[in-house]
Image (cartoon, helix red, strand yellow):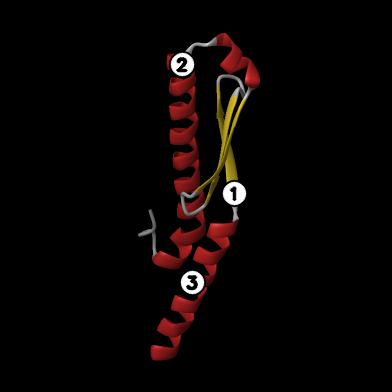
């Protein structure tokens, strides 16, 4: 029994390490704002189309960044749930 628990813990640790390296990309505004996030919900990068800066609409830019970040978080959580779910019996986030 103990060896089975240790094996499951090792598999879970491996899956979590893999999630830290896997990334997803979410976008808003037709791709004008893009966010890259890991499977552990760490933001790796944000890209903003320079045309948005020229428009000078700060509120729109803020809204698009917020939309893209929130979508990246949701997508990252789904990635984690798909990867960890089988290992945790559905208890993963």
**Label 1 to label 3: alpha-carbon separation:** 18 Å
What residue is drawn where x is 45% and y is 47%? 77
What residue is drawn where x is 40% and y is 65%? 88
Q: Secondary structure at mark 1?
A: strand
The residue labelled by disc 3 is 13
Sort mark 3 into few (<14), some (14-19) or many (20+) by Cα contacts within 10 Å: few
**Label 1 to label 2: alpha-carbon separation:** 28 Å
In this rendering, the answer to whether 17 lies above or below 2 is above
The answer to which of marks 1 and 2 sits earlier in the sequence is 1
Q: Are marks 1 and 2 in contact (CB under 8 Å)?
A: no
Q: Secondary structure at mark 3?
A: helix
The answer to which of marks 1 and 3 sits earlier in the sequence is 3
Q: Is 30 or 63 nearer to us in this picture? A: 63
Q: Is residue 88 left or right of residue 15?
A: left
Nearer to us of marks 2 and 3 is 2
**Label 2 to label 3: alpha-carbon separation:** 42 Å
Q: Which mark is residue 9?
A: none
Q: Are marks 2 and 3 in contact (CB under 8 Å)?
A: no
Q: Which mark is residue 58?
A: 2
The answer to which of marks 2 and 3 sits earlier in the sequence is 3
In this rendering, the answer to whether 7 lies above or below 93 is below
The residue labelled by disc 1 is 23
Q: Secondary structure at mark 2?
A: helix
In this rendering, the answer to whether 23 lies above or below 28 is below
Q: Is 70 or 7 nearer to us in this picture? A: 70
In this rendering, the answer to whether 33 lies above or below 77 is above
What residue is drawn where x is 50% and y is 30%? 68
The spot of residue 69 in percent (x, y) is 47, 35
Q: Is 4 or 65 nearer to us in this picture? A: 65
The spot of residue 86 in percent (x, y) is 47, 63
Sort mark 2 into few (<14), some (14-19) or many (20+) by Cα contacts within 10 Å: few
């Amino acid at each position: 029994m103990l060896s089975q628990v240790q094996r499951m813990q090792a598999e879970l640790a491996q899956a979590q390490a893999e999630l830290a390296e896997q990334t997803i990309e979410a976008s808003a505004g037709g791709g004008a704002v893009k966010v890259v996030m890991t499977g552990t919900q760490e933001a790796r990068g944000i890209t903003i189309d320079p045309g948005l800066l020229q428009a000078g609409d700060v509120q729109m830019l803020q809204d698009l960044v917020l939309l893209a970040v929130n979508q990246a978080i949701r997508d990252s959580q789904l990635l984690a749930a798909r990867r960890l779910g089988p290992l945790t019996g559905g208890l993963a986030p």
